[in-house]
Image (cartoon, helix red, strand yellow):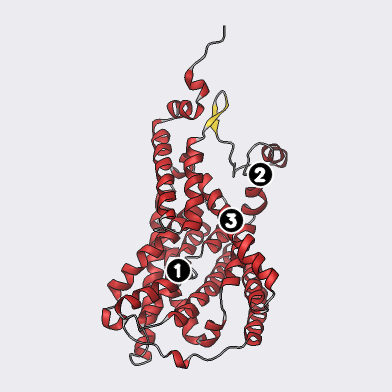
Amino acid sequence: MLEFKILDLFQGAATLMAADPTIAVARVLLMLFGIALVFLGAKNILEPLIMVPMGVGMAAVNAGVMFLSADKMGTIFVDPLISDTAMLIDILQINFLQPIYTLTFSNGLIACLVFMGIGVLCDIGYVLAFPLTSMFIAICAEFGTVATFPIAIAMGLTPKDAASIAMVGGADGPMVLFTSLILSRDLFVPIGIVAYLYLSLAYGGYPYIVRFLVPKHLRAIKMDLKAIPKVSKTEKIGFSVITCTLLCFLFPVAAPLFMSFFLGVIIRDSNIAPFRKFIEGPILYGSTFFLGLILGVLCEAGTILNPVVFPLLILGMTALFLSGIGGIAGGYILYFFNKGKYNPVIGIAGVSCVPSTAKVAEHEVQKIDPRVIILPYALGANISGVITSAIIAGIYITLLR
């Protein structure tokens, strides 16, 4: 007669009992953390487009651990370590998210699709309206992306790993994924997780940086909206295609990112309605959904307990913090250069989390005086930040690859 144990039926519980205590505790905590992310995303405290699918994936993957063989535990969600062709063909037929991961995630395609969607949402006219100030703010707001690199080296990371985690300072998730996939394939899973967790938290943390560094009377400085020049669609398209070609020529390794972003911008300004609806709808939201879901199911306890994750958490936070300070510093420089007629809060928008940081800047000044509107200037810095962070990614990849 066959011996039956109740835990043989409920393998998630069985693997939890059989696992190392550290792994077991981590699994439980990650399940709870995933559930919390879902609620925080649903309540719009964190970014729902990423946090809801990521939270569900995180909770499910740590709950759904099973016995793959007599001496091996795992899941049938995705295996990021499989690269052998024969093994890959087998696992594509077993792990249900493996085809999406292999064909869109592990090669950076999903980052380019998200970037294309971001391009469709961006009005490049704000950059052309204030080209010098926008680019200056964006360069200042890359302070964390540059300064974190030597800090990471000092903490023992390799130059490639240091560059990948430093890219979190640009607050551009697709850029971090693309860079880490090329330079730090072994660490891109924890780096990607750190990046998207912090990018969502940046929306909640940056207002405090603004309030701490910019006094109320400076937050209330009004910008001259009448001075905003009109930019024609022809000028926008011309700038986009020429800049795209030039950047692809200078940094071919990052050409997929440049092409994706500027293609989205050009489609927006060319009034190609079917393409625009397709990119800003199915492509952007579909790729964002699967990006969050894949990141969630990659958050297995064993991955998170990797000793390298803790310094990555510290460095990611440092990069975002320094970039915020750099952006505000750039705002102050323009404030003094313009003899007090420039609102320094615009500086925070140079951190290229489109359009979150621009909305943070606008919200913080509106709380002081609802008549103050800085959003056009903030969006110019914000979109410039996307371009500068792509350029820095291209520089890092070219020098270190």
211 relative to 373 in the view: left or right: left
Name the secondary structure under disc 3.
helix
- Give the residue number, with chain letter if any, for mark 2: 83
Residue occupying the point 45% across, 82% down: 377
- Give the residue number, with chain letter if any, for mark 3: 181
Name the secondary structure under disc 1.
helix
Q: Closer to the observer: label 1 or label 2?
A: 1
Marks 1 and 2, how far apart in space? 36 Å
Which is nearer the N-term, disc 1 or disc 3? 3
Residue occupying the point 51% across, 60% down: 164
Marks 1 and 3, how far apart in space? 25 Å
Marks 2 and 3, how far apart in space? 14 Å
Quadrant that contains the N terminus: top right
Query: Which residue type carries mark 3?
Result: Leu
Query: Which residue type carries mark 1?
Result: Ser
Quadrant that contains the C terminus: bottom right
Tag 1 and tag 3, C-beta contact below 8 Å: no
Q: What is the tally of numbered marks visible in this picture?
A: 3
Tag 1 and tag 2, C-beta contact below 8 Å: no
- Give the residue number, with chain letter if any, for mark 1: 356
Q: Position of residue 56 (x, y in %)?
A: 49, 45
The one of 392 and 209 positioned closer to us in this rendering:
209
**Image quarter for residue 20?**
top left
